[in-house]
Amino acid sequence: MKAISVERLTLIGFGITLLALLMIGGIAWNIAVPFDAVKSIDHTRKVIDDLNELSVKLSEAENAQKAYFLTKEESFISQRNARLDELAIVIQHLHGLTLDNLSQQTRIPQLQKAVDERITIMHGSQKQFEALGFAASRAGFNAGLLASSKVQNILAEAIVDEQVLLDERKLKAAFRIKLVVGSVGFLLVFLLLWALQIRRATLGRMAGEETSLKVREVLLKMGALQDAIFNSQNFSIIATDAQGLIQIFNVGAEHMLGYDAADVVNQISPADISDADELAARAAALSVEFNTPVALGFDALIFKAMRSLEDIHELTYIRRDGSRLQAIVSVTALRDAQDVVIGSLLIGTDNTARKQVEAEQALLDQRLREQQFYTRSLIEANIDALITTDLNGVISDVNHQMEAITGCTRDELIGAPFKNYFTEPAAAELAMKQALQSGKVSNCELTAIAKDGKETEISYNASTIYDRERKLQGVFASARDVTEYKLFEQRLQNNNIELELAKAVAEKANLAKSEFLSSMSHELRTPLNAVLGFAQLMASDNPPPSDNQKLSIDQILQAGWYLLRLINEILDLAMIESGKVSISKESILLADVLLDCQSMIEPQAQTRGIAMIFPVMDESLYVLADRTRLKQVMVNLLSNAIKYNQDEGSVTVEYAVHGENRIRISVKDAGKGLSPEQLGQLFQPFNRLGQDAGNEEGTGIGLVVTRQLIELMGGVIGVESSVGVGSVFWIELALALAPALHEDDHDELMMEQSAGKMPAWASSQRSLLYVEDNPANLALVEQLIARRSDLKLLTAVDAHLGISTAQICKPDVILMDINLPGLSGFGALKILANDPLTAHIPVMALSANAMQRDIEKGLDAGFFRYLTKPIKVNEFMDALDLALHYAKEHGLDRNKGELDTRTRENVPEL
């Protein structure tokens, strides 16, 4: 029997030891788990934060673009671009955070694609808005709604998945913490009770027996086990007697609390090293729970254990250095064989880590609540009504905007069929089913109806939503109130129609006015020609008319010339206002223009004894203007200065360079001057400033035409005047460079001439007629043709002279300016083409009108080539050689007087 008992004790000892080691290992593993759980929870929080931040950045970018559409302030585009850059950073961060989540790793590329699509649409709608206006950008606006909804759907799915994952990790962390505490308590109590029981049983059995060697070994092993338990630094073990004095204070207690066993054994109670306020609160709570007074101090600590109740609670120990230790303490009553309480046992574990986990968990919970509040705030702040439904079309959630549209509360809407809140339930249900079938629906126009019958036009966009396992859950939809937009669009369409009608009426009226003025000019000129002609014949008749007759004839001539001038100025004004005046801006030598004007105006000044003072011009000053129109402007200003001057007065012409690239030309008279009131009325048509009854003739149109011509040439006109002193009228124009040969082309041409090269087709001297009114351009072409011994240059200063020269001299090629005085280059080309004597001659245009439409217009009119100023020598010579070759192959000499019928399309290109 003794041998059996010893063997049994040995097996029990080994079993207990193995079980203790396994439980200690499990506890150690479980202690590490909560800390990993906290990290996982925090990691999930970061993912949710990034997803919400992504939603915020996208909304801010969209709002900035909307603000730009409303205000056209470029600063809003800068704000939008900044938010878009931040979007890319957030998405990149999400890639790193979701490496441990396969479903999110699948969703992030979808999110990136949806965001890129939204950004592309955003940029496209901006370009449409800037190019075509708000109405034309509507398609981009609608596409943006769909793309934005798609992004928000993906974000909503991702946030839901992360929140589910967060809840799972929180539950696991809480479970691990409870498991650790329970396991520790159970292990210690289990081991201690087993050790005491075995020790008591062994000693009792051996009291009357002889001690054997095997029994000694068992006792030694059991003693070693007890020592391992009592000397563990991971648990504090404090045993007291019945009066509460500490009897056992193990190594773990010394390590945790900082006291030596000798300092506390038989000296103090566990209550003396515990938080007094905490024990007082425990005593009060127990008194209420058990409806009996509980004493303070140690009695409160062991109250439940003395009644054989499980007592595991939190306790704050005060360490020797005054610091505090949060512990989980298991309190057990120690009893003898007769079940009499002989003391108490307090087994404690350090609860600091759990407290830290709980604090972090509380912080995470608070952040979750704040994040949920923030997410809900974003949803509620959306300008669109947002709705989620299940697979059957029953509403599962809405935001405040949906409440406002329907007039129902959120509680009333949730659980109700989605289709019930639209004027056409079938159409609403169809839109939802389309979303379920195809995954999305875009820009579906529906009419929502409120409880009070109010109707709201909406643009419905929807997409499907899924759970973590990608199982279809329902539909997420946005309904944007487009009532105002519809009204605005309708008003805009009505305004556009009205504008088009008004434009058509104005164009028709303008065309009618131009046709009327043209017809009136023709009809008036014909009889006026006879009146002036016969009056001049009568004035020069032989015998000469009498004095009375001559006086009458002079009155007829004066009135006739005045009427002719009035007709011309009215026609000029009408052509300018209708946009039919063609301006050819080119480099013009200012000295030549002023010299021409001086020779034209001096005879008029001499009749009144008015001195004309012109400056000595700098021969290097060129202006960018139309030569004919500039002369018309200067002659008008000089004529007015003479007309409204005093007899024996003076007119002074001056010039000065303003800034780096402008020149001012002034015409100063010594007349009566103008008052401020007259200056304010100066450029009004037919307003002669009170001079209607005066001796000086005038139409009141000249200055109006002058100002418009100056502005068409890119210049400005102004006036300064003082009553009794005189007036100064001035114009400002842009300076230009002198027309010159390109240095490279000039060197190449000189090299060819020095080498004696000649075109292969040049066997005899040919002729070129150049029709141009600008002396500078004439001089330039003369220099070019002078280097061609095979060519002879003929010139004409206007179209009529050019036509006559062509009919008489029959040149091989004609070079024609477009903007000629009197008859334009187009009119001259038409006359030449209709004349059998000149129809075969290739006519090339040379003009400063260098726009593509000008070139196309010239070629369509029939010009052989259309060259632009400034001249490029190689291009000019190549075109001239091609025209000469064409003239030789298709001229009258080859076809015996018959015109060539080939079209311009048969001519080879340069």
Image: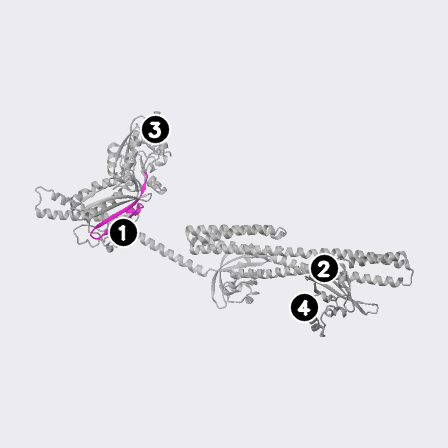
Q: In terms of secondary structure, where does tag 4 sit?
A: helix
Q: Amino acid at mark 2?
A: Met
Q: What's under tag 3, amino acid-wise?
A: Met
Q: CA distance from mark 3 to mark 4?
A: 114 Å
Q: Which region shows up in magenta?
A: 709-737
Name the residue carrying label 4. 277
641 and 828: which one is in front? Answer: 641
Looking at the image, tell me whether mark 1 or mark 4 is earlier in sequence order: 4
- Work out which quarter of the rendered image holds the N terminus and state it: bottom right
Disc 4 from disc 2: Cα separation: 21 Å
Q: In the image, which disc is placed on residue 567?
A: none
- Judged by depth in the image, the label closer to the viewer, 1 or 3, is 3
Q: Is residue 729 above or below residue 863?
A: below
Q: CA distance from mark 1 to mark 2?
A: 109 Å
The spot of residue 528 in percent (x, y) is 18, 47
Res 840 visible: no
In the rendered image, residue 368, in percent from the top left (x then y), is placed at 60, 60
**Which residue is denoted by mark 1 in the rendering?**
513
Numbered circles on residues, count: 4
- 4 and 2 marks in contact (CB < 8 Å): no
Q: Which residue is mark 2?
A: 256
Which residue bears the numbered disc 3? 750
Q: Residue at x 30, y 49 (%)?
A: 578
The tag earlier along the polypeptide, 1 or 2, is 2
Q: Secondary structure at mark 1?
A: helix
The image quarter containing residue 346 is: bottom right
